[in-house]
Image (cartoon, helix red, strand yellow):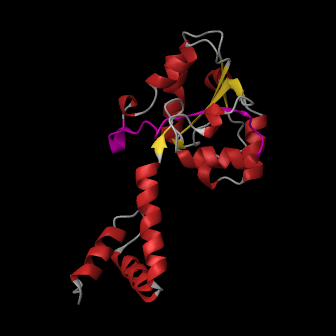
C-alpha cells in the first residue's frame, strides 16, 4: 500500500533518501523526520556538505581515486613507491589498504569487477588506463588486490592476460589471509595488512 504524506516536500525528501543503497522508504521517512526535528542549521549544513562533495570531488586522472584536484594526494606524493601499483575495485578499498599502514605504493581503481550477470564487461572498467600505465615502463609490480569472489577472480585472470605481454612486470596477488568469498572492505586491517605483505605471484595460483 502506497504511503500517503501530509507534505509534498516531505515526500520529496523521502523519495530522494530512499534512492540511497540499503535505505528503504521507512528508513528514509525516519531520517527525513529526524532532520526535520533537528535545528534548521543541521539540515542546511547536511545539504551543503552533500552539494559541496558532489560538485567538488572528481576522480584522479592517474589512478581514478577520488580527489579534489586533477591528481589525487597519493599519486602526487613523491615519497610513494611509483614502481608498485595496487589494483583495487573501489575507492573504499583504497581507504582500507591505507588504514593498514603497510603499503607505500600507488593504486589503480577499476571502478568495479567483471560481472556478466550484472552486465559489467571489461570495457566498462578502468582496465585500458591500467595497461597504459604499465606500458609506460615505470611500473615493476602490479598487485591484484580484488575481493576473493568469483567476479574478483575472473577479473584477476583477465588482467593477468592483458598484462602478460609486459614480461618484466611482476604480477602478484594478496596472500590467502583473505578468505575466499570475502570482500576487501569487510576484511579487518590486520588480516588485510598481512595478506598484502605476504602476497604471492599470480602465476603460481594458475599453476595450482
Q: In this rendering, would 96 be left or right of 35?
A: right
**Residue sitting at x 54%, y 20%:** 133
How many numbered dots are placed on residues in this image? Answer: 0
> Could you tell me which residue is drawn at 72 percent across and 28 percent down?
200
> Quadrant where the N terminus lies?
bottom left
Q: Quadrant of residue 194?
A: top right
Residue 69 image position (x, y, % from top left): 52, 40
Q: Residue 180: in sight, yes or no? A: no
User: Residue placed farthest to the front in the image?
Assistant: 41
Q: Which residues are magenta?
A: 101-120
Point 73% across, 51% down: residue: 189
Rendered location of residue 155, percent (x, y): 49, 32
Q: Is residue 165 above or below residue 47?
A: above
Could one spot residue 169 in this view of the protein? yes
What is the chief secondary structure element of the magenta stretch? Answer: loop
Q: Position of residue 39 (x, y in %)?
A: 47, 86
130 over 188 or under it: above or below: above
154 or 10, nearer to the observer: 10
Q: Is residue 54 above or below residue 37?
A: above
In the rendering, at what x and y percent does residue 166 appear? 58, 10
Residue 82 forms part of the magenta stretch: no
The residue positioned 46% from the left and 70% from the top of the image is 46
Vertically, is 39 above or below 86?
Answer: below
As for residue 113 lying within the magenta part, the answer is: yes
Position of 167 with respect to 130 (left or right) is right
Question: Would you identify the image quadrant in which residue 144 lies?
Answer: top right
Name the image quarter holding the C terminus: top right
Amino acid at each position: 500500500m502506497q504511503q500517503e504524506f501530509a507534505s509534498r516536500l516531505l515526500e520529496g525528501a523521502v523519495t530522494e533518501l530512499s534512492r540511497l543503497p540499503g535505505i528503504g522508504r521507512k528508513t528514509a521517512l525516519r531520517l527525513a523526520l529526524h532532520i526535520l526535528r533537528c535545528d534548521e542549521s543541521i539540515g542546511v549544513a547536511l545539504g551543503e556538505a552533500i552539494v559541496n562533495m558532489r560538485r567538488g570531488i572528481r576522480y584522479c586522472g592517474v589512478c581514478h581515486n577520488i580527489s579534489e584536484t586533477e591528481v589525487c594526494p597519493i599519486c602526487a606524493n613523491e615519497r610513494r613507491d611509483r614502481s608498485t601499483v595496487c589494483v583495487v575495485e573501489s575507492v573504499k578499498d583504497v581507504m582500507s589498504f591505507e588504514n593498514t599502514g603497510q603499503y607505500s605504493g600507488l593504486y589503480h581503481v577499476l571502478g568495479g569487477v567483471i560481472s556478466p550477470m550484472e552486465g559489467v564487461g571489461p570495457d566498462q572498467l578502468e582496465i585500458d588506463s591500467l595497461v597504459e600505465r604499465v606500458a609506460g615502463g615505470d611500473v615493476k609490480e602490479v598487485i591484484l588486490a580484488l575481493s576473493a569472489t568469483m567476479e574478483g577472480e575472473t577479473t584477476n585472470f583477465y588482467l593477468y592476460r592483458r598484462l602478460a605481454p609486459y614480461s618484466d612486470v611482476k604480477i602478484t596477488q594478496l596472500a590467502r589471509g583473505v578468505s575466499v568469498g570475502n570482500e576487501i572492505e569487510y576484511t579487518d586491517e590486520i588480516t588485510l595488512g598481512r595478506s598484502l605483505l605476504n602476497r604471492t605471484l599470480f602465476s603460481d595460483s594458475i599453476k595450482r
